Image: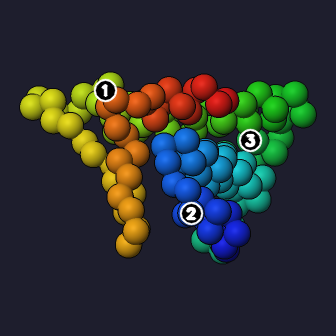
Amino acid sequence: MYPTAFTKVKKSMNNEKFVDGLKLHVRDAAVSDVISKLKEPPGRRILPQIKLLSEWYNSLAEDDIAKVNSIIELTAHEVLFGVLTVLDGARVIDEEKGQLELIYETPDKRVMLNNPSEIGLHELLNASN
């Protein structure tokens, strides 16, 4: 779907490119998808909860829609931030406090994207926002 973007990222993957990719293809895509579903729920068998939320969303004034969209953006950012803090080891999810290693590997190289000696992924997310 995005061959040029992925080809560019693939050639020089590092922690910054990884976070940029997550922002674009995960966080921003989730925001866009949720807003799109609220505006016009897809499919023939729309879940009652989605239908109700869509009707409410579409009844809002422009200013209120902008506020709801901002809440959606904030929520998506905070979810991604939380996942990255876990990958960085800044937020613990188990009693053993083990270390997670996020490896990007190609036939030519192997890169640890959450290297503890470098800036954390969650810090990169907030630094470039």
Q: Position of residue 126 (x, y in %)?
A: 58, 26
Q: What's the CA distance linking mark 2 and mark 1?
A: 30 Å
Density class for disc 2 (Cα within 10 Å; few <14, some 14-19, many ≥20) is few
Whether residue 30 is visible here, answered yes or no, is no
Give x and y (percent) for residue 17: 57, 48
Q: Pointers 3 and 1 in contact (CB under 8 A)?
A: no
Q: Which residue is mark 2?
A: 11
Question: Which type of secondary structure does the marked residue at label 2 adopt?
Answer: helix
Q: Which residue is tagged 3?
A: 56
Residue 120 in the image: above or below residue 58: above
First in residue order: circle 2 vs circle 3: 2
Query: In the displayed structure, does residue 43 sit left or right of residue 112?
Result: right
| Secondary structure at numbered mark 1 | loop
Q: CA distance from mark 3 to mark 1?
A: 36 Å
User: Which amino acid does the dot numbered 1 rest on?
Assistant: Arg
Q: Which residue bears the numbered disc 1?
A: 91
Taking depth in this image into account, of 60 and 37 the one nearest to the observer is: 37
Q: Nearer the viewer, residue 60 or 15?
A: 15
